[in-house]
Image (cartoon, rainbow, N blue to C red):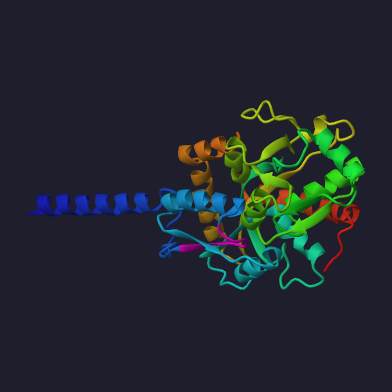
Amino acid sequence: MIVAAIRATRVASALVAMSVLAAGAFGIATADAFPDRPIRMIVPYPAGGPTDILARQVAAQMSDKIGQTVVVDNRGGANGVIGTDVVAKSSPDGYTILMTGIEQHVGNIHMFKSVPYDPIKDFVPITEIDAEPLILVVSPSLPVKSVKELVELAKAKPGTLNFASSSLGSLSHLAGEKLKLMAGIDMVHVPYKGGGPAMLDVLAGNVPIYFSAIPASLPHIQAGKLRALAITSSTRNKDLPDLPTLSETPGLADYEASIKFGIWTVAKTPADRVAALNKALVAGLKAPAFVEFLAKQGGLTPVANSPEEMAARIDAIAKQLPETYKAANITPQ
């Protein structure tokens, strides 16, 4: 009987150890079993746009690693402010996270006279997702086949060419303003409430020019519905080797622009929960399925870094933005 009791004790101990190891596989389950319910990922833009497309892939991989469903919640409006404010006002428990572009997140304080949160103090960085260059696309009806020809047309018809953006202050907006400044041309900016609505109007031919995220534009380029003129990275994309960079155009040698997507949660979230979210996200971003997804979007690769590294990136961008907005003559609305 004593032997049987010892064996039973050993079996029970082994089962407990196995359950502890399983719970802590990704460092997620802490003493308070975080997370024990679904996590909400706020995307401050409408469904169907490039941020939303990326967010749903990230959410799927994060769900697999963290052991709970990650639900994407689109809260578009006010250039991302509405959705971002939902996160800022949420409980600091790790169950509400924000996914958006770093430039957009930090830049809104320069876009509006009043923003109901502080983009630095009210949020905790978790990890960067990736850095995505844009593709300068035009409607096939526009009689240009290169950036050089677009610049020449804009100079011949100043103030008559419109370019779309996903929103005021977005990278698609700033990329257009940067082209205007560097090329010395006058184009009219047409902002939308997200990349999805902007793309629909460009495809319809209502606005002929758009700096678009690669995932959103690539299928339409391949189908002949859009004409790609150049990519905004400083070097050519290895998966799009025939697409020149804007910097290859005379007079635009220093041109470069890319979207840095990241994940935040609200300030005062316990450090162990931020660490758990980071570990699950990094594992998800490095998963073969997600790496393959990014590769198919035009040779993109995940960043998947630490909260500290993301904070350093935010700080660098925050220091650069005021000068960028001033050069583009963007004033708070």
Q: Which residues are magenta?
A: 39-47
Query: Which image quadrant is residue 108 in?
Result: bottom right
Query: Which image quadrant is residue 194 in?
Result: bottom right
Number of disc labels: 0
Q: Is residue 135 left or right of residue 59?
A: right
Frontmost residue, 173 versus 267: 173
> Where in the figure is residue 262, as x and y percent of width and height?
63, 52
> Where in the figure is residue 184, as x and y percent of width and height?
92, 43
> Where in the figure is residue 142, as x and y percent of width and height?
75, 41
Report the residue at 10% width, 51% height from top.
Answer: 4
State whether residue 126 appears in this view: no
Residue 245 versus residue 86 in the image, above or below: above
Frontmost residue, 28 versus 75: 75
Q: Where does the C terminus fall, quadrant-wise?
A: bottom right
Report the residue at 67% width, 63% height from top.
Answer: 80
Q: Is residue 86 left or right of residue 235?
A: left
State whether residue 172 appears in this view: yes
Report the residue at 84% width, 44% height from top.
Answer: 179
Q: Is residue 181 left or right of residue 277?
A: right
